[in-house]
Image: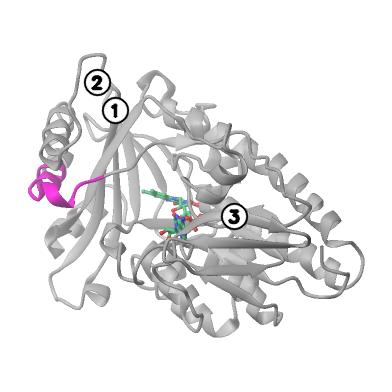
Amino acid sequence: MTSDRKPPEFIISGAGIIGPLLANALKARNIPFVILERDTSLEFREKSGWAITLHYALEAFKNLVPKQKMDPLYDSQVRPNFHKSDSGNFKYINASTGEVVVCIPPSSRIRVRREQIRRVLLDGLEVEWDSKVESIDYHDDLVSVTCSNGKQYTGDVLIGCDGSNSITRRLIDPKEGGLYQLPIRFCGARVQLNKEEFDRISNHFDPLLFQGTVPETNTFFWYSALATPEYTKAPDLYYAQVNLSWNVPETDEPFETQEQKANALKKHSQGLSPELSWLVDRAVQNPEELMEIKLCDWEKVDWDDHDGKVLLALDSLHPMTMYRGSACNEGILDVAELVKQLDLHLQGLFSWKDAVANYRNSVQERARQAVLLSRQACLDAHDMSKIKPNSTSPLLSVRKSK
Ligand SMILES: Cc1cc2nc3c(=O)[nH]c(=O)nc-3n(C[C@H](O)[C@H](O)[C@H](O)COP(=O)(O)OP(=O)(O)OC[C@H]3O[C@@H](n4cnc5c(N)ncnc54)[C@H](O)[C@@H]3O)c2cc1C
């Protein structure tokens, strides 16, 4: 491995959120890196974007990005300047009646569009687009990756930031690197709203997001504001994310084509309050826009680091369901820990191998618990008996404990 005080050269696989976040911190330290991304361009998947709440890792996030990116970061909020007077709450409703079952005041947070913070993070960074990592080789102290375009890159450290289905994780752990699939199906879309519709939902429920369960069917409903005219650049054009998820039925439910997804959404929207069901009707109007998200996780959160030559972070390391809104926050804490260990290594306090061991220990302890709590939260969201005031379900207790 590298000698102490010599900065290791990083190969970052994946230009999602966590790869670019790490790259910003490396750049600030003049540590060399290359970012490899399978997509052909920044815009490739932007339409399927969603919003992310940065809450318990917000301060860590701010410490990892340069000061000049702070204003653009705050400009990525789904509602302009919302952090200045956060009037939202975490609301969980009975999705059949619309009544609020649990209402928890938020901690300090910002809710941002994923695609926009990604752009902010990538600003000023070079990315090797259309470079899908396909294989990894080790030679002495170095690691090489080969991409589908035939290009090869060699460095001291490869870090897999390539998402929940991480090729890096699957290559270093071919036997156990696969995902656990929960018996729940999740599907939805970005829907277009006008001002009257957007304001009505905001005033009646919550300006940022809310969730609920239909008691009769245990179907889960999720609404999240995404964009206002300040972002869409059209006076009456608003966007929101509308999703449903449900226990996978015992009867066969075809779910291959976009049309089948639309039919399933319509079927599972039965029992929703009329104040909400029209949102699902709006979502299925354009079946081609529907997006299924596989609800998977990986509780092992452990890997062979090949003497410090291969690392994993965020969804590559601890993919989890999004029912506690914690995956990205955990990933930010991964990067903060890695950078801390890197700094200590560069100061000569640890060998790189020890720095990586410290990173692994810290991440495992924290993230494994988050994976399991998120799995339980996902299951509980589809079981109305768990949805009550003073519930101890991790679905509802996260906002109190963090
Ligand atoms: C609907 C929804 C809501 C969410 N809300 C929250 C929230 O409120 N709070 C929170 O903390 N988290 C939330 N999350 C989770 C959060 O969005 C993810 O944890 C985060 O985006 C993962 O970032 P990442 O960089 O690890 O992976 P990704 O963003 O998935 O990026 C991985 C990148 O790697 C690239 N890639 C894949 N394979 C290869 C390869 N072979 N070679 C090169 N590149 C490759 C991909 O193209 C992609 O660009 C939510 C998730 C969803 C789906």
Q: Which residue is mark 1?
A: 246
| Quadrant where ligand 1 appears | bottom left
Compared across the picture, whether 176 is left or right of 1 comes to left
The residue at the far top in this view is 250
Colour scheme of this structure image?
one colour
Tell which tag, 3 or 2, sits nearer the viewer: 3
Q: CA distance from mark 3 to mark 2?
A: 46 Å
Q: Position of residue 102 (x, y in %)?
A: 41, 35
Q: Describe the element under mark 3 as helix, strand or loop.
A: strand
Question: Which corner quadrant of the image does residue 83 belong to?
Answer: bottom left
Q: Which mark is residue 217?
A: 2
Dot placed on the residue nearer the N-terminal end, 1 or 3: 3
Are the two marked residues, 2 and 1, in contact with CB atoms closer than 8 angstroms?
Answer: yes
Q: Amino acid at mark 3?
A: Ile
- Does the magenta portion include 9? no
Tell which tag, 1 or 3, sits nearer the viewer: 3
Question: Which corner quadrant of the image does residue 294 belong to?
Answer: top left
Which part of the image, by quadrant, shows the N terminus? bottom right
Residue placed most toward the observer, 101 or 61: 61
Q: Residue at x 44, y 69 (%)?
A: 117
Residue placed most toward the observer, 122 or 222: 122
- Which residues are drawn in magenta? 279-291
Question: Which corner quadrant of the image does residue 173 belong to?
Answer: top right
Compared across the picture, whether 177 is left or right of 270 comes to right
Identify whether 299 is placed above or below 204. Answer: above
Dot placed on the residue nearer the N-terminal end, 2 or 1: 2
Q: Which residue is mark 3?
A: 136
Q: Residue at x 58, y 69 (%)?
A: 153
Q: Amino acid at mark 1?
A: Trp
Q: Position of residue 348 (x, y in %)?
A: 91, 70
Q: Describe the element under mark 1 as helix, strand or loop.
A: strand
Q: CA distance from mark 1 to mark 3?
A: 38 Å
